[in-house]
Image (cartoon, grey):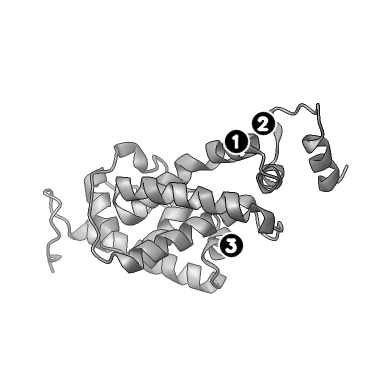
Amino acid sequence: MNREGLLSDYMSEGHTVESERMSDWLLVKGVAARDERAFTELYGRYSAAIYNYLVHMIFDRHVAEDLLQEIFFSIWKGAGRFRGQSSVKTWIYRIAHHQTVSWLRRNRRLRCIKLPKDSYPEHDPEGIFETNSSHQDLRNALFKLSPEHKEVLELAFFHGMSYAEIADVLQCPLGTVKSRMSYAKKRIVSVLERQDPSGIETSKAR
């Protein structure tokens, strides 16, 4: 059965499908049809990850909470325009990206907060975070990156996205993502190498 047929069955009276079995695509179509159950399921699947993304990008939990609601309100309003040309995941993150960029442009002065230790991955597939540095050292290093460079690290390492998915979220060429990632990794390593035990960046001994 095709996707339209599945959606028709799902929306028909008396049809029972457990929410965890519904695809993201069907959930978005349900949201477009103003199905509150579908919206609740979609929110449950993505709200925690999007909230963490927002906190890591803007360093303000209260603002992140407000933006999270704005993002899902945009999803509620715009679900009917989703055509499936990208995955639902990258579509949602693209909305979050635009909201974040807009906020950062309006608020250039960022406030740093203490993030929980489990905000960072225990396993780093490329090894750039596998150092003896503390979580606070890593937070300090990430804070020194520009939003553009911090975001590619955020999406790749904390949200498991491929470079192609990141390019889709940011709506930029794949080469741009690779270039930003290369710079960001080098910058992180450089900052960590220059930090003394107190977390203060120092000049590297020659």
The mark that comes first in sequence, 3 or 2, is: 2
Dot 3 alpha-carbon crowd within 10 angstroms: few under 14, some 14 to 19, many 20 or more? some
Q: Is residue 40 left or right of residue 9?
A: left
Q: Is residue 116 left or right of residue 198?
A: right
- Identity, as a three-letter code, of the amino acid under mark 2: Ser
- Identity, as a three-letter code, of the amino acid under mark 3: Ala
Task: Point out residue 115 in the picture as x, y percentages from the top left corner.
Answer: 28, 43
Q: Is residue 13 left or right of residue 103?
A: right
From the image, tell me which residue sits under label 2.
19
C-beta proximity under 8 Å, tags 1 and 2: yes
Residue 41 marker: 1
Q: Residue at x 45, y 47 (%)?
A: 69
Task: Point out residue 179 in the picture as x, y percentages from the top left corner.
Answer: 45, 71
Q: Residue at x 55, y 68 (%)?
A: 171
Q: Residue at x 66, y 43 (%)?
A: 34
From the image, tell me which residue sits under label 3.
164
- Helix, strand or loop at label 2? It is helix
Mark in front: 3 vs 2: 2
Say which quarter of the image contains residue 51.
top left
Residue 60 visible, this angle: yes
Q: Is residue 62 left or right of residue 167?
A: left
Distance of label 1 from label 3 (alpha carbons): 26 Å
